[in-house]
Amino acid sequence: TADADTSSASVQVLSQIAVTPNNGSLLRIRHASESTKTDMVFGLFLPGSHTKLLRSKGQTLPALYWLSGLTCDDTNFSIKAGAFAAAEREGIALVIPDTSPRGDGVPDADTYDLGQGAGFYVDATEEPWNLNYQMDSYITKELPSLVLEKYGVGDVKGVFGHSMGGHGALTCAFRDPKSWASVSAFAPIANPTSCPWGQNAFENYLGSVDAGKDHDATLLLKANGPFGEYDDILIDQGMDDEFLEAGQLLPENLEEAAADVGQKLTVRRQDGHDHSYYFISSFVDDHVKFHAKRLWAAHGRQLAKVGGKSNVQESDTAGKPITCQAMVARAAKEPLTLETITVDPPRAGEVRVKVVANALCHTDIYTLDGYDPEGLFPSILGHEAGAIVESVGPGVSSVKPGDHVVPCYTPQCAQPSCIFCQSPKTNLCPQIRGTQGSGVMPDGTTRFHDADGNDIFHFMGCSTFSEYTVLAEISCAVIPKEAPLEKACLFGCGVSTGLGAVWNTCKVETGATVAVFGLGAVGLAVIQGAKYAGASRIIAVDINPDKFVMARQLGATDCVDSSALEMPVQQHIAGDLTPWGVDYSFDCTGNTDVMRAALECAHRGWGTSCVIGVAASGHEISTRPFQLVTGRVWKGTAFGGFKTRTDVPVLVERVMSGELPIEHFITHRFDGVEKTTDAVEALHGGECLRAVVKY
């Protein structure tokens, strides 16, 4: 018999590779098993769109367990089934265990249907199998506990499998329906006490066929069904399956039992399909979708049952209106006014926060100066902040009072049904776009009221020129409490946008050439990002030469004062400085003439120009179509393509590690919300990158 070090620390990731376009990861993990007294290896798929977010929040992810058939190990499904794209799309994890213990000293047999590769998902009671072959305990207890503790996976779980694994999935679910939210199978051994495979396994592992009745799906369903936990059970069976004809599978017996007890069971007989992984891969998407629907529903019920209160320490002001100070924009082109306002408690899906630090962004000034077509008044501006959660509304589960957050004007609902959140191509979640643009919360109302009780509009879903504000839960990026909020607030807009335009939107590669138009905070962040990306040449363009010092410190190799040129700046770059233009250009000005110049200095044949700056209302961009016909690409970015709740915490962690310095962006500091007016003046002065106001 085999034995192994069963300490909980004995867990090793053997490999980790990306297996979906959205960087979903397949991990192969070895650990010392207390159940089998051996090392066990399992596969774990984590969807890329959720992994960082869930880990940074301490949340859990629903898991779907796959149980393989005879002779398989943990790799067969990973290599052949093609299930990862569907799991990524549905936002669930996959757990893929081995079919038996393995290794020197582990009992084995000369036949393929007994011993290593054929554990039958039972706890053996007979020698020599009983020490190591404890697969029921391993699958139903030890492994779920491990993946939940180590990876935050499987607070809600479903199970499916093939052949012997289909038998295992059905019996796990039928023996303990409270622990499994959903179950399905491909060509399962549905009545093992009545077929040669099952009889052989039960006689050897359990001592008799009769002892296998507790591991026979058909008999369990007859004795204990119907199972109210399962609104349906999905079975796919290939009609050219050689083992169907040989009497090993017996799905008709399971159907008869289901009919007798009134259990909903859907058996799909698939013409032309055999017992192979070609069969599984043909229908695995259907099964993943079947489970995901039920797993997410169960996940929601569990959160509702917990009710948020179990992980929330309510403040004294929770559920009550708060009176505080705010800088209110009463009208365009008028100074902000310091007012005492009332901030209502958060409603369902909302979070009320105490703003600690706020950085002014040019977008705030752009709106205050009347250039924003969506600008509404009276309103509370501000959208680059660091804050502490004061209280949460009903149904909120991803943040709790005391959490430190960066409010994000681009939300991330992270729902499996959101094609924008699930796509690696964009960060533009539209979940609350309509109401956010109308200056109200998702339910169509406002949380701000002035001293006379009149409503005040919200701004960009943030409104951080106030000591307290209310945000949608999906707009809150939770960050480490050790991170200084006066620095972390910079990731609420400008700095993130500049870095992400380089890293995400354009994916600037090592050795590329870059031109950056406009050397405010966003432009300098583009330079910093390009330097980190390994750009070989970075041309900085501005009409204020005083900005060139900082640009060079961050990585600019050339600086151009476009106002001093006797030719258009695009001709200077694509002609004098380079023969054909730069690989990537970035407009960070919001000036449509500059946007054209940036495009026209992009390299003939492949140059990409990215629009970052926001143009004034009514302005349009233009160029000769020939510029695009000859291979240039014109694109834009919002928040640098970062998925906010997932990626902002990572950016903050990079700052804390010293890898990503951002202190240089803070050129002015003020104390007190009333000093926001001074910060506005500093930003208007032209020498300010970011003015941070601490409340």
Image: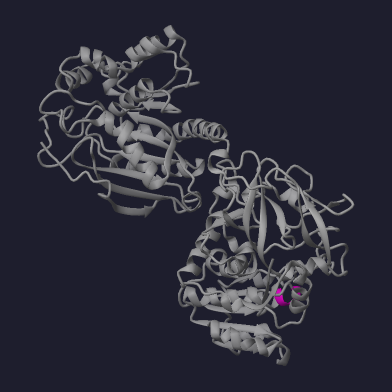
Residue extending farthest top: 260
Residue 495, percent from left and from top = 61, 70
* Residue 86 in view in this figure: yes
Tell me the quarter of the image containing the C terminus: bottom right
Tell me the quarter of the image containing the N terminus: top left
Residue drawn where x is 31% and y is 24% of the image: 167
Q: Which of 407 and 307 is in front in this view?
A: 307
* Left or right: 417, with 292 as reference point: right
Figure check: 289 above or below 674:
above
Residue 383, percent from left and from top = 70, 62
Figure check: 115 above or below 355:
above
Residue 117, percent from left and from top = 20, 34
Q: Which of 41 and 38 is in front in this view?
A: 38
The region drawn magenta spans: 591-595
Residue 220, percent from left and from top = 34, 14
* Left or right: 239, with 297 as reference point: left
Residue drawn where x is 54% and y is 64% of the image: 504
* Left or right: 574, with 172 as reference point: right
